[in-house]
Image (cartoon, rainbow, N blue to C red):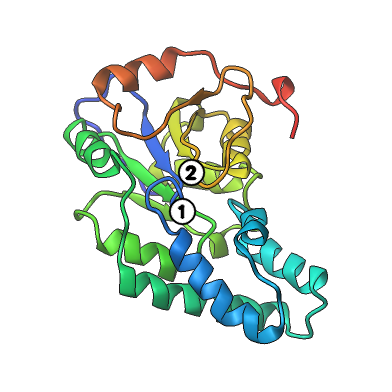
Amino acid sequence: MQLISRSTARDDFPAAVLFDLDGTVADTEANWFEGEMSVLKPLGVPWTHEVAMRYVGVSIEWSVRDIISRFDLSISPDDLLENLVSAVHEAAQRRRTQWLPGVLETLDLLRELEIPTALVTMSYRQLADVVIDDCAEGSFHAVVTGEEVERGKPDPQPYLLAAERLGVDIDSCLIFEDSTPGVLAGIRSGAQVVAIPCQLSVPPFPNLVQCESMSGVDESFLRDIMTAARPREENISE
């Protein structure tokens, strides 16, 4: 377990802030769509933006299995997964990181406040590394990627693992997410959750705070959100 020391720890701030990647920290839609088209079109898959939206926020493994079943493909799940990750990675390296509004400023603020952070994504590590390499050193104290968990979002396992790696209580964490599967994973973990919808809308779950971007995140926001009512599993339906 990686323990994070906070010399200025205060109970009114989150013990850690956990970030989803795709659609929350960075706009990666173009990378994914380009990579998916380059791999799936030669296989005869009628890939469109509308079809791609079905797979926002869920694990790559689940997506690959569903695509093979839905379009009756003969390729193996392992081969399709490898081809997709490689194609998206090539697109991401060409474009580099398209930061979403307020993200870099929020990371700067958290460094100043000595609040640890984690990047928690269902993308694979080589895709996450493109983003990590483009931000200031030490922006993320822990990283959890899709290949490291048995159960992806909406299961809470990725967020629970991130809190464990940071050595903090998940109940004291704040999560930023953009998708319904990610929001559900956050709620089920026991953390406080803020939704910042990007590609698709997020249902108005009771007590769920939704923002247009991270541009308004400041010290007051971090204090207030941790005392706000939290959405709970029993209050919502998928």
- Give the residue type at disc 2: Cys
Rendering coords of residue 101 (x, y %): 30, 41
Crowdedness near tag 2: few (<14), some (14–19) or many (≥20) residues, C-alpha within 10 Å: some
N-terminal label among 2 and 1: 1
Could you say which disc has been placed on residue 198 in the image?
2
Towards the viewer: 135 or 67 = 67
Residue 138 visible in this rendered orientation of the protein = yes
Residue 11 visible in this rendered orientation of the protein = no
Q: CA distance from mark 2 to mark 1?
A: 9 Å
Crowdedness near tag 1: few (<14), some (14–19) or many (≥20) residues, C-alpha within 10 Å: many
Could you say which disc has been placed on residue 193 in the image?
none
- Of all residues, the one furthest to the left in this rendering is 112
Pointer 1: what residue? Answer: 22
Towards the viewer: 29 or 229 = 29
The residue lying at 50 percent from left, 41 percent from top is: 178
Q: Quadrant of residue 39?
A: bottom right
Asked if 117 appears above or below 37 in the picture, the reply is: above
Towards the viewer: 121 or 28 = 28
Judged from the image, the secondary structure of the residue bearing numbered disc 2 is: loop
Asked if 11 appears above or below 166 in the picture, the reply is: above
The residue lying at 47 percent from left, 13 percent from top is: 228
